[in-house]
Amino acid sequence: MIRLETRTGSGRAANLRSVATDKPEPLTQAQKEQLEAELAELEGPRRAEAVQAIASARSFGDLSENFEYHAAKNEQGLLERRITMLRDRHHRRGRRRRRHGHRRDTR
């Protein structure tokens, strides 16, 4: 899970930073399937669209003043961040195992 913390310092506005946790996150089968479907969509067609948008914006010329290029790069960054968050969540789901690897005695 990613949580946002605020920090203040020397009169400046609060800064946000993300903190990843290693705690396992229990997911139902339906949630796991939804997570995997979203990852497949983002890593496949959506990532390809972002690359195409950047390539198209580059063709407009000078990158230093090219709004389309900067907007496309920003969108790509947001997309990659979402993919990273979903992969982390999926990874923590996959690590959930029994503590001792054997069944508990139910007597």
Image (cartoon, helix red, strand yellow):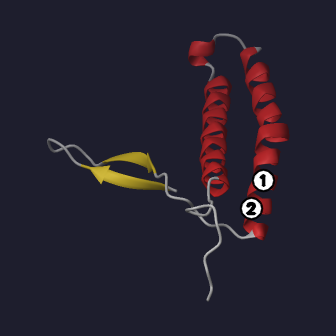
The image shows residue 96, relative to residue 55, as above or below, that is below
Residue 5, position as x, y percentages in the image = 35, 53
Q: Is residue 37 left or right of residue 88?
A: right
Which residue is tagged 1?
36
Q: Which residue is at the far top?
A: 62
At 77% from the left and 35% from the top, the residue drawn is 47
Report which quarter residue 61 is drawn in: top right
Q: Quadrant of the C terminus?
A: bottom right
**Which residue occupies the foreground of this view, 64 or 93?**
93
Residue 8, position as x, y percentages in the image = 22, 48
Which residue is tagged 2?
32
Q: Which residue is at the far left?
A: 10
Graded by Cα atoms within 10 Å as few (under 14), some (14 to 19) or many (20 or more), the crowding at tag 1 reads some
Which label number is shown at residue 97?
none
**Which residue occupies the foreground of this view, 96 or 41?**
96
Q: Looking at the image, do the residues carrying marks 2 and 1 touch, with CB atoms under 8 Å apart? A: yes
Q: SS for tag 1?
A: helix
Report which quarter residue 9 is drawn in: top left
Q: Is residue 40 left or right of residue 76?
A: right
